[in-house]
Amino acid sequence: MTVREALSEGAAALEHHETDTPRLDAALLLAHARGSTRERLYMDLAESAPPAVLDSYRNALHRRLSGEPVAWIIGVKEFWGLEFTVGPGVLCPRPDSEILVEAALEIMQGMIPEAAAETAQSAIDNRPLSAKDSWRIGTMPHNGAQSAAIRHNAPRCDDQPPIPANHPTSGRESPLSQPGASQPAGVPPSAVQHRPAGRLHDCCCGPGTLALALSHRRPDWDISASDISEDAARYFALNNEKLCAGRVGYSHADLMEGIGGPFDIIVSNPPYLTPAETEERTALGWREPVLALNGKDTDGLGIIRRLIPRIFNRLSPGGTTLIEADPLQMPRIEEILFANGFEDIEIRRDLGNRDRVMIARRHKIK
């Protein structure tokens, strides 16, 4: 049997299964069985497929037909150009979550570096933020001239008190000292050595989808993550080491319980299916963990209702949260955010033009 024939056999077997991409699934499984890339697979369509490869391939097809995600079978899932290790017990990264990463990066880029540094230093020193309203955390204007004026007039990082030599963070190597790391504009190298550009936390992090994608792009930020799942902890550790040299902190916690702040940004892709939807998908053969799917309460917002007040209490004044959820839940989530003191609420749409990510800001201190 040729590679082309094996590919057609697999695609036909998956045609009536619960997948929108039977040929893509078959190609990924066959490439994995051959130990090659999918690109190489298409170059070798006329080649013969050895019996051992066919046996491995058909076993993988059987697992896919029984409901296992392709990513679990091949052990990896690509997200934001990165290869995440995944497997039984964790939610596989979804393309729609890239919308949240993209939005978070925009906010990180727009934050005034000096203000973010003050928030990080406040967390280290466990002291209240100062009342320097003129340079509190905010969004840089899109107008280039205005941005330059703000950078020129804002207090300089090197005007801030240095970290004492006996401080726990003194002498620690900055992520920006690593090759290829970028430095925020306007921040002196001496200040970056001690102060991250900002603090971000990923709640319900799973295998590290959001936190590690963001840290990979912005190693100058102090990024941490948490989840209640033991399986998530295992895969997070693998991906953290592989993708971010282990620099992202992890806590085993139920919706940030026991985790302090303040954070400039908190992101989350929490469980948001209703119990009925969760049961329906399980009956259809979904293997992904109920813990990562069931949002509880009849509307699927039980976990989000618990989470939003905790986010508010851990955000710095003017800090931002980004939450991924179902498009039909957005109006109710907006009400919950407003009821808990958030403002400046906006929604980002996913690749299918559906409301997918809710962005809200904690009000600043007047």
Image (tube, rainbow, N blue to C red):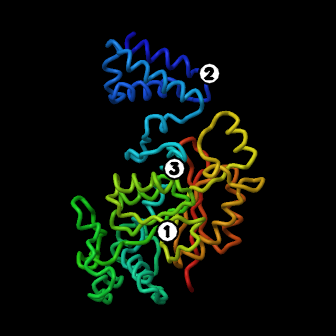
Quote the CA–CA distance across marks 3 and 1: 16 Å
User: Quick one: which residue is furthest to the right in this view?
Assistant: 298
Pointer 3: what residue?
A: 97
Q: Quadrant of the C terminus?
A: bottom right
Across and down, in percent, residue 220 comes to: 33, 67
Name the residue type under label 2: His
| Front residue of 187 and 305 | 305
Give the image quarter of residue 278. top right
Label pair 1/2, CB-CB below 8 angstroms: no
Pointer 2: what residue?
A: 16
User: Residue at horizontal 67%, vertical 55%?
Assistant: 330
173 left or right of 259? left
Across and down, in percent, residue 192 comes to: 28, 75
Name the residue type under label 1: Ile
Q: Is residue 320 above or below residue 120?
A: above
Pointer 1: what residue?
A: 265
